[in-house]
Amino acid sequence: MPKLTFLGHACFLLGEEGKETLVFDPFLRENPQASLRPEEVKAEYVLISHGHYDHLGEAYEIAEANKAMIISTSEISNDAESKGLSAHPLNIGGKFNFPFGWVKLTLAFHGSGFAGGHACGFVVHYYGKNIYFAGDTGLFSDMKLIGELTPLDIALLPIGDNYTMGIDDAAIAASFLKAKTVIPYHYNTWPLIAADPEEFKKKVEEKTNSRCVIISPGESHNF
Ligand code: NI
Ligand code: MN
């Protein structure tokens, strides 16, 4: 059974006993919610949604220590390769098969934090389960298409407002995506992105058929 562990802010581990582990946006050292130190992260793949420091974080350090493959935009992948790391470049709308399944890059309405690049989200097909990690993004109606093209088991959505969707827009995103389970992130790391996940859960479960699961930093959800 795949397991998703929230490490705080926008960082998740996706793994299953005896299978590859993927880490998303590992920003841990300066993350007040972080439940692991970067040295403790064991992963075969490092997914990076964009170049802002709270997402790029210790991605390169973790990739180097684990001899892991980075999966990101062409610009971030090329930069990682120029520093001697292994990386797989993708661009928006593109999909590639990996040993664990496939990864497709999605649109994210947000700054790239990286010259010439785009911010992105990911749809990950991992041993039969479909997970959407939205990255940092505002609400956009093409999220409907993301959920139509790939029936989602889990949608991971930012809810902290200010830099990304807030609770109301993220609840609309959930209604577009129609995932079985919705999990919030990118909130309460700092006062600027304070949000009540219980309020989000209530809105999602009132407006949609999705279940909302709140994972505290350091906790896991099996699915
Ligand atoms: Ni950002
Ligand atoms: Mn961010």
Image (cartoon, grey):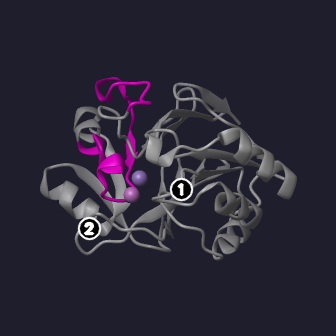
Q: Which residue is mark 2?
A: 75
Query: Could you say where residue 141 lies in the image, as x and y percent from the top left?
Result: 66, 76
Q: Which residues are magenta?
A: 32-60
From the viewer's perspective, is 129 left or right of 23? right
The quarter holding residue 81 reads: bottom left
| Residue farthest to the front, as pictured | 191
Local secondary structure at mark 2: helix
**Is residue 189 positioned above or below 33 on the image?**
below
Q: Which residue is mark 1?
A: 161
Q: Nearer the viewer, mark 2 or mark 1?
A: 1
Query: Could you say where residue 200 lies in the image, as x and y percent from the top left?
Result: 71, 47
- Residue 48 forms part of the magenta stretch: yes
Residue in the image at 71% along x and 56% along y: 152
Residue in the image at 78% along x and 52% along y: 204
From the viewer's perspective, is 27 left or right of 22? left
Query: Could you say where residue 172 lies in the image, as x and y percent from the top left?
Result: 72, 64
Whether residue 106 can be seen here: yes
Q: Amino acid at mark 2?
A: Glu
Q: Nearer the viewer, residue 15 or 144?
A: 144
Crowding near the residue tagged with mark 1, few <14, some 14–19, many ≥20 C-alpha atoms within 10 Å: many
- Residue 221 forms part of the magenta stretch: no
Local secondary structure at mark 1: loop
